[in-house]
Image: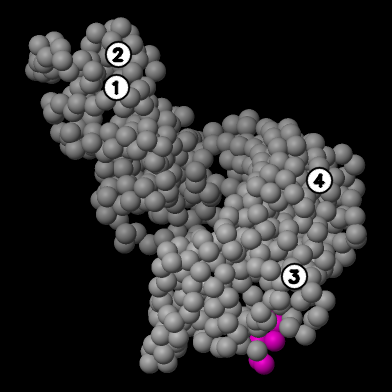
Amino acid sequence: MDKRSTRKRSKSAKVTNTLDKVDRLSSLPYEILTKILTLLPTKDAITTSVLSSKWISLWTFANVFVFPNNFPSITRNNFVEIFNNILAQRRSNLINRLFLCFETCYDPDLVVKMISMAINQKVQEINLFLYPFQVYLPSQLFTCKTLTVLELVGSLKFFQISYVHLPSLKILHINLLSFVEDETLMRLFSGCPVLEELIYEEFTFKRTFSFEISVPTLKRLCVRSSDKRLHINTPRLQYFQLDYTTAIDYAIRNMNNLKEAYINIYFDPEDEEEKENIPNLFNGIHKTQFLSFDVTSTEVNELADGEIKWTQPNIAVPTCLSSHLTSLIFKDYEGTTDEFELISYFLASGNALKRTIIYFQTNWDPTMASNDVSRLCSLQRASIENKTSYVLRS
Amino acid sequence: MAEEVSSQMNSLSISETNPSSSATISLVSGDDIVFKVEPTIAKEMETVQSFIDETDGKITTIPLPNISSHDLPYVIEYCEKSIAGKITKEFEAEFVKKLNNEEVKELFLAANYLNIKKLLDFLSQVIADRIANKSVEYVRRYFGIENDFTPEEEAKLREELAWTFTGVDPDDEDEN
C-alpha cells in the first residue's frame, strides 16, 4: 500500500462508528471483493451479479470454478449452454481450483474441456467427483506442473498413461470405480516426487504380486481397500490409517517414523489364514507412538460386532507393551472372560502405563458394572503410576 | 477536520513526553482511545509497520482513524494469537462466534486497511460462509448494497441467471 496516500486518507477519513450506512464494502478494491467470491461456489458467485451494477461482472474475475453438487435447474437442455456461457464470460486467465461434483452430466466432453482449460490456466487444485458417466482424463493432467492437490473419485478413466510428472503434487486422493492396471497406478505414484498425503480407496481384488504403495516422501496414508494384498513402503510415514481391511498378505516396510496408526480390521473369525497373518501387520507398524485398533466382524449374527477372542500368548511380552505403552483405552467393555483376561494381561505387563480408561458398553447394567469394576480394580498392575478410570456412559 | 488533526497531535505529544514507553507502540482508534501494544504486534499490521519504518522508528503513536475502539481489540487479539502461532481451527471458531455480521464487516475493513493478510483471508472465508446460498436481498442487506438497477434491468438479469436461484436458504437467519 502506498504509505503517503494512507496517511493522507487517515487525516481526511471520518471516524467509522458515526454509523454512516454507506456501502463501504462495495467501495473496496475489486481484488479484495473478488477474494470473497473465490471462496464461494461458482453458482453463488454468479448470483452476486444481481446485487448492483458494481457487482455485475465481478464474478468473472474469480479464479476458481467450483460446482460442489448438481442443481435441479441444470438440465439436459441447458447444461451445455450454461457452462459454455460461464466459460465465455470468465475474464480471469488463471484457475486456482477446479471442483466438479456431478451425479449426472449431459456432456462428458465439456467436462474434459474444463479440465484441459484448468490445466492450461495453471490450476493448483483439481477435485473431481464424477459418476456414473465415464470421463476419460486428458493425458496432460499427469504432467501438470502447477498441480498441488488432485482428487479423482468416481467413474473416471485413464487412457494409457505413458508418462507421469507432477512435480508439485502434495495431496492425492484416488477412489475409482473402474480397475486401473498396477503399472499405471505405480507409475502415477512414482511420478509425484513431493507427495505427502495419499488417500487410496479401492474395491477390487486384482492386484498382482508386484503392486506396492511405494512413496519415499509420504507423510500421511489412508488405505481403504478390499484387496487381499497390502504392500507398503513409505519410510517417512507419520500417520497411517487402515480402514476395514480384509487383507491377508501384509508386507509393510520402512515405517520407522510412524507416530499415529488407526487400524480397523474387517475380520472373519472362520478364516484361519487371516488370523495367522494379522501379526505381520502389527510387525510392520510396531514403531508407532499411538495405536487405535478396532475389529469389525463379518459374522454379526452369531458373534457380537467386534467381540474379542483372546488367547494368552505363550511368547515373551513384546517390548512395545512392556516398556513403551503409556496409555490404554478400551471401548465397549462387556465383561466377557476374554476381555477381562486381555485387560489383565495388559495391566500386568505394561510397566510404563500411566493411564488406563475402560469404557463400558452403554447399555450395561450399572449394578453388574460395579461388580466388574471391583474385579478389574483387584487386578495386578505392573506400573504403580497407572491411573485407571472406568466410564459407564461415554 | 480541524478537530481530527488536533486529536492526532494530542496523541503524538503523549508519546513524546513519555519516552520510557518507546518500546511499545500506541495505536489510537478513531474515537481517540489509545491501545499500547508490543512492537511485534505492529509488525503483523503492515500498514502500521511501514509508517514506523518511514519515520525511522521515531514515531511510535499511530492514529488509526478508520478503526473504532470497539473493533481494534479484536484485531490485536488475533495478531497476538498469530505471533504465538496459536491460530487453530478451534480458536477461529470461538473468535468468529463472538462477532455479529456488522462486526465481521468492520473487522474485514480494518484488516484490509491495516494490511493483515492472515486476518483478511480468514474473514473472507467467514463472509463467504455467511452469504453462501443466501438470497440476493439478504446479501444486499448484509453488505449494505444499494440496488442501482431499474426493476426491468433486474428482472432481465434474474431471468438470464434463473438457474442460479434454486435451493436458496430462507432469509430468517438475518441478524442485521
Residue A65 part of the magenta segment: no
Q: Are marks 1 and 2 on the same chain?
A: yes
Q: Is residue B34 above or below residue A288?
A: above
For label 4, count other residues whose C-alpha is less than 10 Å away and answer few (under 14), some (14-19) or many (20+). some
* Residue bearing mark 2: B52
Q: Residue at 37% across / 46% down in the picture? A: B92
Q: Which mark is residue A188?
A: 4
Residue B9 position, x and y percent, is 12, 12
Task: Look at the numbered disc 3 and give the secondary structure of its residue.
Answer: helix
Task: Look at the numbered disc 4 and give the secondary structure of its residue.
Answer: helix
Q: Residue at 38% across / 29% down in the picture? A: B116
Q: To which quarter of the image does residue A166 belong?
A: top right
Task: Confirm or deny contact between disc 3 and disc 2 (CB under 8 A).
Answer: no
Q: Earlier in the sequence, mark 1 or mark 2?
A: 1
* Part of the protein shown in magenta: A297-302
Near-viewer residue (B132 or B46): B46
Q: Are marks 3 and 4 on the same chain?
A: yes
Amino acid type, callout 4: Leu
Host chain of mark 3: A
Q: Is residue A365 above or below residue A13?
A: below
Mark 1 vs mark 4, CA separation in Å: 49 Å
Q: To which quarter of the image does residue B143 belong?
A: top left
* Residue bearing mark 1: B39
Task: Confirm or deny contact between disc 3 and disc 1 (CB under 8 A).
Answer: no
Near-viewer residue (A126 or A113): A126
- The nearer-to-camera label among 3 and 1 is 3
For label 1, count other residues whose C-alpha is less than 10 Å away and answer few (under 14), some (14-19) or many (20+). some
